Image: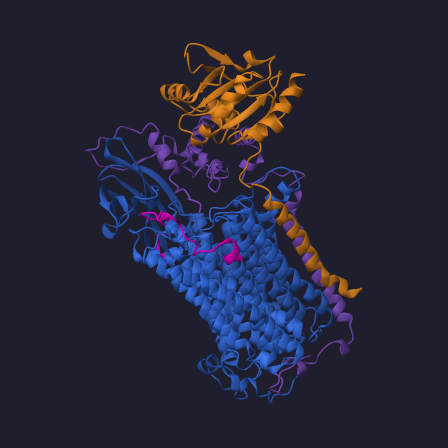
Chain colours: A orange, B purple, C blue
Amino acid sequence: MKSLKFLIPLALFGVLALFLAAGLKLDPREVPSPLIGKPAPDFKLTRLDDPTASISRDDMLGKVWILNVWASWCVACREEHPMLVEFAQRKLVPVYGLNYKDVRADGTAWLSRHGNPYEASLFDGDGRVGIDFGVYGVPETFVIDRKGVIRFKQIGPLTPEVLRDRIEPLLKSLQA
Amino acid sequence: MTHPETRFARVVLLACLVLFGATSPLRAGEAAPAADDPALEARLVAITSELRCLVCQNQTIADSHADLAVDLRNQVREMLRRGDSREQIVAYMTARYGDFVLYRPPLKESTALLWFGPALLMVAGLVVLVVVLRRRARLPDESFETDDDTSGPTPAAGGPTS
Amino acid sequence: MIPELGHFALWLALATALLLGVLPLAGTLRERDEWMALARPLATALCIAVGIAFVCLTASFVRNDFSVLYVASNSNSALPLQYRIAGVWGGHEGSLLLWVTMLCVWMAAVASFSRHLPQPVVARILSVMGWVAVGFLLFTLITSNPFERLLPVPADGRDLNPLLQDPGMVIHPPMLYMGYVGFSVAFAFAVSALIGGNLDAQWARWTRPWTLAAWMFLTIGITLGSWWAYYTLGWGGWWFWDPVENASFMPWLAGTALVHSLAVTEKRGAFKSWTVLLAILAFSLSLLGTFLVRSGVLSSVHAFATDPRRGLFILAFLVIVVGTSLALYAWRAPRVGLGSRFALLSRETLLLGNNVMLVVAMAAVLLGTLYPLLLDALGMGKISVGPPYFDTVFVPLMAPVVFLMGIGPLARWKQASLPELALRLRWAFAVAVLAALGSGWLAGRIAPGTTLGLLMAWWLVASVATDLWGRVKPREGAGIGARAALLPRATLGMMVAHLGVAVFIFGVTLVKTFEVERDVRMDMGDTTTIEGYVFTFRGVRELDGPNYRAARARVEVTRDGRKVADMFPEKRIYRVQRNPMTNAAIQTGFTRDLYVSLGEAVDGGAWIVRVYYKPFIDWIWGGCVLMVLGGLLAATDRRYRSRAAASVTPAATPAAPPPLAPAMRRVGTLEHEAP
């Protein structure tokens, strides 16, 4: 029927409106990581507490572990830190820190003031390792499996919901 | 309300570079280029101005003065000095940050519609136009209004209702 | 007290707007004259109520009333008065109030300048605008109240964003909103014609000046925004294809198509349903822009503070307004007549071709702007679409438009002759090619992109010249002067506007090809030379502004030994928000801009300085100003100004080609057909 073609603009608009509605639930600023499912980048960094000792990626093979990117100048890190301390006490998996673009003295002082949940903190003063991990903000948290593959990335502070609903089940399945 | 960052970019960065020559502050002369190697700098700008800064997301890595942008510019500069090609640098960025970091979307299956869409729309539009006009041309004269009916306002002040 | 008064005024306005939306419209359906007659008084009452609210908000800013949350977030006691006033529209809530205020300005204009329209038509139009007002007022009152109080009252405000503390901020948003909102008038005309069933050439004649006016304001708004970015942001760019910029450009493209389509409908009664669709499209794009900026769906430097609840509300409003009007269109448009007949090659077809290309260009911009959202919503990953995409895609789409712009004005209505066109235009084409190559060679470079740009610009100039010559060359005893005096304003307007496009293309092409940018380290007395201009660094001193501290450099510019200017680039730190701001120094000239911006200080008392030479960059905005001027000429054409003449049917009989002239007070020759 000839008049059907006049419905085309309305139909096109309907499709557009659906996408706009879907868009309301999305965050255009969040950058998903392309490294999920890929091996963690190779690194070798000194420990925050001992500049003579270093840890490399291959040292971490064979265990499931969590890497938390933090800095003494990061305000949002203070939000998630108590939760992280509590989580580490449960000894589910070792938690390592990546002290990103910080000064050793400031980092150490911050940990003694706010608590230290980390087995060790890796000192990434110039942020190169952070770039390799695709870090673009602080804090960020990664879950890495036995083979050294990144399985999960949390952008922004950890919340109890994320820990409970996404990280812990993942850890269980990785350790099984 | 957002706080847009000013662009002070390369100038901050370039200021930290080793300064070219050792012009004595007392002797005025031809100002030296701010960068060691202007040709390299130009390539740096060309590449980084197509990359999105992930921190202040509405600026390019060339323009932004966020820490991450400064670090990434340094990284790219090193890579250029090392002789890496543009493709290698772009691959480096997308391996870490995904396609989101590219202001020029890569041509993939998912972006085929994006890149070919405008041309397709143009062709479709013109085809539809020609088809509609041809169909119109075949209609008998009675379907049309004559020039009498179309020009000029209607005489009655009450206004047309049909 | 004053904020509460303003808040109350908004509620009053909402009630009035509801009455305005319902009563006059019902009056047209039930043929109740007294209800229809309420349209103008209700519209006036609405304007007064909104006006009061706007004045109250402005007063709160001027009085530094920080007990109002919005004032505290966007102002400061040290902020100079003009920026306190501009702060009214510096944030989301206030800018919404500006939107509604602009809607009332247009409504008042329609109410005043519509005496020649039949009562039912006026009633419908004002009712439709009333419904738009209802939507925005509801949105404001429910989610974005500018009069919300803040307790405890802070000692001082958070200050207006330093980037906005600039004369450009004072006029860019009002102009832009006048444009966006102005398309609601064309929209209201269209919807009212669909409801009332009076879609004809008459309707097009009524709608056209309003559309031109809105288009002019939008052009001014976009031009100001671009120019402001150029001199404020410090790195010489003037268009970034940012989602919000695109949100203003899309209605402009649709509006341009609409203006041309209206010309055909007015003259020949053709394309009626297409024109109505364009009118709905232009305003829908304005509303879409509002949604994109305020919903948080796209990331943009211009975006206001986002809130999904607000986004949902605007989306609902968008769906209701656009959905209803498109449904109305689907219902009524099939019955609309075809208008006059025209041949496959005729001015009508060329204008239609222009329309199709402009809409395709608009669709391309829409595609690029929304594609990241599209992929993300489908779970297909996150991408960015930026200037590299738009620059690649947009220019090839515009080239056909420019080509058609040269031919269209010379084609006859109803039936054009290809041989005649080719004959008239061969000279123009030859001149264009030679001039493009010639000017490229003179400037020192012949490159493909540059030549294409110059070709487009020279083509427009040559074809306008051909058209003009055809209309004013002496014949039958009438000299050039006599014939020129008979040129309708609308024709003149068209030529000026098209020349404006040519000037714009010249500006863009030449600046992109020949601009020079240089970063240098400058000590006292150091110089750098670009294109014969010698820039000498004369040191930096610190100074205090009303609400900032600045480091200001003096750069002396000379050429051939003679002083050209002193330039004073600055770096400012605003005391409250503490963002560093770069204020570039620009020396404007007809054929070039000199642009200097200050970088960081380095060891030894030297500074990094960026120096630009930008040839013909002001032609970009100059071209836009010409377009506006052309629009003004067209909008003030005799046939819109003389109500009396409009009610006299023409004495001239309709003829086969060339087609007849519009109504004129004296019977003139048949050539004076306005576009």
Vertical side of C350 occupied by A24: above or below: above
Q: Residue at x 73, y 76 (%)?
A: B144
Query: Looking at the picture, does residue C625 appear above or below residue C162?
Result: below
Percent x, y for residue C481? 44, 81
B155 horizontally vs C640: left or right: right
Residue A130 colored magenta?
no
Residue A42, picture quadrant: top right
Q: Is residue B8 depicted above or below C560 in this figure?
A: above
Is the stretch drawn in magenta largely helix, strand or loop?
A: loop
A17 sits left or right of C496 in the view = right
* Front residue of this view, candidates C433 and C186: C186
Question: In the picture, residue A100 is in which quadrant?
Answer: top left
Could you say where residue C101 lies in the image, as x and y percent from the top left? 46, 64
Image coordinates of residue C572 in percent, x first then y, are 30, 44
Q: Quadrant of the C terminus of chain B?
A: bottom right
Residue name at image x 53 percent, y 86 percent: C645
Q: Residue at x 54, y 21 (%)?
A: A87
Specify start and end residues of the magenta stretch as a single range: C139-167
Coordinates of residue C311 in the picture (x, y in percent): 56, 50
Q: Is residue C143 magenta?
A: yes
**For the view shown, which residue lies furthest in the right direction?**
A1
Q: How many marks?
A: 0
Relative to the observer, which residue lies in front, C625 or C611? C625
Question: What residue occupies the far left of the structure in this picture?
Answer: B26
Instruction: Tell me if I can see residue A119 in this picture.
Output: yes
Task: Work out whether residue C416 can be spotted.
Answer: no
